[in-house]
Image (cartoon, rainbow, N blue to C red):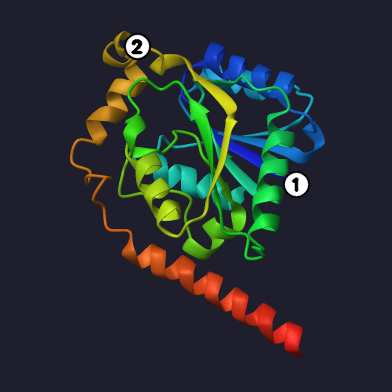
Amino acid sequence: MNFSLFLNSRKRPLLLKDFLKSVEENTFDKKSIEVIIRYDYDDDLTHLIASESFTFDVKFIRGHRPENLHSSINELAKLSSGKNLFVCNDDIRILTKNWDLIAINKISEYLSKKSISDDIYYCLTSCNSIDRIVSEGYCSFPIISKKATEVLGFFMYDAFKTLGGDSSIYRLYKSIGRVIDVTEIKIDHVLHRTLQDVFFADLVTKEYREKNKHCPNPSVFDISNEVNLLNKHISEKCLNNLKNLTA
């Protein structure tokens, strides 16, 4: 399995169907992807979609409404079987034809050029989120290697309940020099296209923003422990490779 796309969804059936349609229309190899969607027990609208059939592997997981969206994302990441984990939203559309082929080629080229065998990397996609701080360099919907999340034990920091996970996790991979540019992959963030979209958000967004008020500042959040953890794995992998060459 090349890619696992995963997301939390709540009472946005039309947007969710548009997202799934964009995956169907723009994925080169549908047999090598899976989509995992978590939704709430009180969300009967999404439950109707869960009974539909798709041309690719779609798994729906129903549960209690999560207080922390990043904790839920981390749970979904652990359930994912893809080598590359692509976090998504129910209000996005993938716009780039053959996005998966582009990502695979970019990742392979990067790892080969730098002689990397530890499979630790972060892929930077491109989206039109108006509330993203462009100068900080991060993307809202990164693709991260499954191996990296296994080493860390998470996909995104759950210190941020709803917002801030994307920028803080980018800082981590940038600090160890493992960011791969796949900004050829374009994403339309439908509910974040304009400031009006952001300020007059739907009820789902408003409720979760309230939960994020007391979260830390992602720009200065301490990532040192995770930097050390990833660097330790990289060093050990490099040492083992050297031992195998000299054995």
Name the residue nearer the viewer: 169 or 79.
Answer: 169
Q: Residue at x 66, y 47 (%)?
A: 107
SS at mark 1 in the image: loop
Q: Residue at x 51, y 23 (%)?
A: 90
Relative image position of residue 180 (x, y in whole percent): 56, 46
Name above or below for residue 164 compared with residue 226.
above
Camera sees residue 82: no
x, y percentage for residue 239?
61, 81
Marks 1 and 2, Cα distance to the nearest angstrom?
Answer: 35 Å
In the rendered picture of this protein, how many numbered marks are placed on residues? 2
> What type is the residue that disc 2 sits on?
Asp
Question: Foreground: 106 or 46?
Answer: 106
Q: Is residue 56 left or right of residue 6?
A: right
Q: Are marks 1 and 2 in contact (CB under 8 Å)?
A: no
Q: Residue at x 18, y 41 (%)?
A: 214
Residue 128 vs 219, above or below: the answer is above
Q: Earlier in the sequence, mark 1 or mark 2?
A: 1
Q: Position of residue 137 (x, y in %)?
A: 39, 38
Q: Is residue 76 found left or right of 204 in the rendered image?
A: right
Name the residue tied to disc 2.
197
Q: Position of residue 173 (x, y in %)?
A: 45, 53
Name the residue beneath numbered marker 1: 1
Q: Residues within 10 Å of mark 1 (few under 14, many from 20)?
A: few
Going by the numbered disc 1, the residue's amino acid type is Met
User: Residue 217 sits in which quadrant?
Assistant: top left
